Amino acid sequence: MSEKPFSAAAERNRGPILEVLKAWLPPSGRLLEIGAGTGQHAQQHAKALPQWQWLPSERAAEMPVLMAGLAGSAIPNLEAPIVLDVCRDWPERRFDAIYSANTAHIMHWPAVKALFSGASGVLEPGGQFFLYGPFMRAGQHHATGNVDFDAALKSRDPGMGVRDLDDLDRLAANNHLERIAEILMPANNHVLIFGRTEAE
């Protein structure tokens, strides 16, 4: 039997991220995970949050990895994963929360814009959008490691890169979202939490 896909980074960060989710999520609801990768977060988080219906998603090209990672999972509130390209069709459902880890810096900027627009479109009023990863502020990195990481991303693909909080806040404001928290995490990362306003 072949081994399941495994991400060392996902293994390291899933515990601290789960503590944030436990602290900020309401007792129950429906959550969409964007860019679920190997499925390690989906499995741990869904198991630890049994009152939350958890729907993992991935781009079509990455679905074989996610399906292999989730194979054999027997978690009642973990739904079968769906294909989701943020620049195309989103689910025709509404969610109480959206969660995405380590995606904004590998997406090109048009996809980041589509991420915020699509998230706003499927979030219930008052819902929350959790975005985990490294971020800049006013064009400045807060850690030397992120400078090197940003440079490595851009050398691989100029469309990638660590995103700036000011730019993300502007995207949020244009999509009925407002940043309500910024939580410092291990390894120079943050969880940004955006709330869905009532306005349409």
Image (spheres, helix red, strand yellow):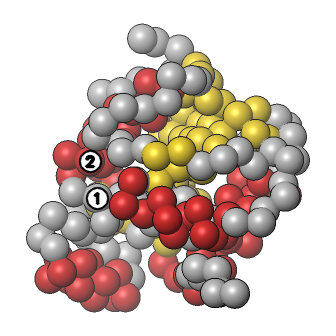
- Name the quadrant of the C terminus: top left
Residue tagged by mark 1? 107
Horizontal and vertical percent position of residue 112: 30, 48
Give me the residue at 46% from left, 12% from top: 199
Which residue is at 62% across, 29% downward? Answer: 95
Quadrant showing the N terminus: bottom right
Element on which disc 1 rests: loop
What residue is shown with label 2? 111
Q: Amino acid at mark 1?
A: Met
- Residue 143: x and y in percent read 38, 82
Give the farthest residue toward the top. 200
**Which of 144/119 is in front?**
119
Q: Quadrant of residue 30?
A: top right
Which amino acid lies under the numbered mark 2 shown in the image of this protein? Ala
Residue 127 lies, with reference to residue 170, above or below; the image says: above
> Relative to residue 95, is residue 11 depicted above or below?
below
